Amino acid sequence: AQLEAALDAGFALRSLGRIDAAGQRFRQGWQDATRSLRLAIGVELGHALARTLFDLGQLDDAEATAAEAMALQHRIAGFVTRRRGPRMPLELGIVRGDWQAGARALAAEGQMEPDPHYRLAYEQIVAVAIARLGGPGSTNAALAHMVAAERDAAEAACPRCTGELQLRRAEVLARIGDVARAREALEASRGAGVLQEHHVLSLFAEGLIAAAEGDLDRSAPLLSEAARIAEEVGQRIEALWIRLDLARVLRQSDPGSARSMLDEVDVTAKRFGATTLQGLAEQGLRSLGTRTWRRSRVAGAGSRELLTPREREVARLVADGSTNSEIAERLFLSRKTVERHVSNVLAKLGARNRTELAARLPGASKRRPSVTPAP
């Protein structure tokens, strides 16, 4: 009952826009479930945690947790989880790899999903990705996936999912210039009873609609507020997408502010490992006359600024002499996840072992770290 309560509490916190707090609940529940061998609820908690880590920009943690949850799911014969696992690794591919391959894989996986409640999420993600990244020739493909998602939403009859879908539909339609239908979708989302967690998406869609109408003076404040709230509540990947659009709006009236915005997205996306968004930011900077190849040289492999928040936390514990097992216990992570973080930290800092890592971090404790990864 305690683990089920942790799962329900996490989703309740998400619905209130408290994503950081939701992540803490999911992480504690996930750790407790795996320790107590409560595998079924553990799968649920693992997928929920992976989704939340993705939103928070902790992409390495999200990928590792999703993989562990899927491995756990495969161990349970005949178990069907309410929140399907394959979607998260594939969605990660959109923001940190070949987005087209990720979108194709998501579409294929969605076609194999028998439940319309979950199938609509696949179609929705693909439609938004194509609208954001596909360019002018991708309109029909984006609309086709959105129509499929609407069909699934009607069959699933879930008010929450329908509300979010209408907001995403408004975004897609605004991006292709169909302002009238975008406004209809935005109004429909309000009628469906959108929860607090979707407030950011509502502001985002409204800002995009204003931009499509040419009302840049109205669009910029809406997008700025959407980005601010997204960052505040923990929707940090969404905040990067919003800032990319805000920079696009600002470049026409205030190229200096647009450049600063793209600089911020570039640095943050690089720290998160969100290479797709980083590439878009650098493309925007180049269009404003900034030479991004010089920036890449300055921010080389030895820069601590490239570490994610979780990697900095792990690096500090390694430098203080903690073993991988001790770090896993302290941060409520699996050993496999800690090992991955340690490898990433060593590579990013250009350190050959844990001793060199400690030497590169000022203020580490006097406890001597292990030269090789400890068991």
Image (spheres, rainbow, N blue to C red):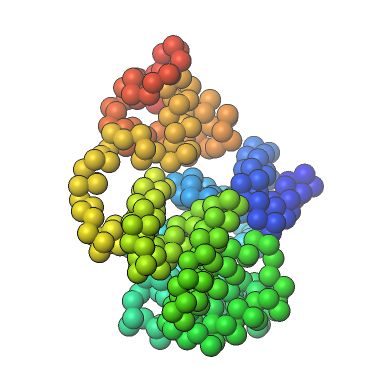
Q: Residue at x 55, y 37 (%)?
A: 333
User: Furthest-right residue in view?
Assistant: 1
User: Furthest-top residue in view?
Assistant: 366
**In the depicted view, which residue is nearer to us: 290 or 200?**
290
Quarter of the image for residue 281 reads bottom left
How far from the left and from the top, in percent, is residue 53? 54, 49
Q: Residue at x 24, y 46 (%)?
A: 295
Q: Residue at x 52, y 47 (%)?
A: 65
How far from the left and from the top, in percent, is residue 210? 50, 76
Image height of 266 relative to 337, above or below: below
Q: From the viewer's perspective, is 369 left or right of 1?
A: left
How far from the left and from the top, in percent, is residue 317? 48, 25
**In the depicted view, which residue is nearer to us: 28 or 211?**
211
**In the depicted view, which residue is nearer to us: 99 or 216?**
216
Image height of 212 relative to 202, above or below: below
Q: Residue at x 33, y 20 (%)?
A: 359
Residue 170 in view (yes/no): yes
**In the depicted view, which residue is nearer to us: 205 or 306?**
205
Image height of 85 relative to 32, above or below: below
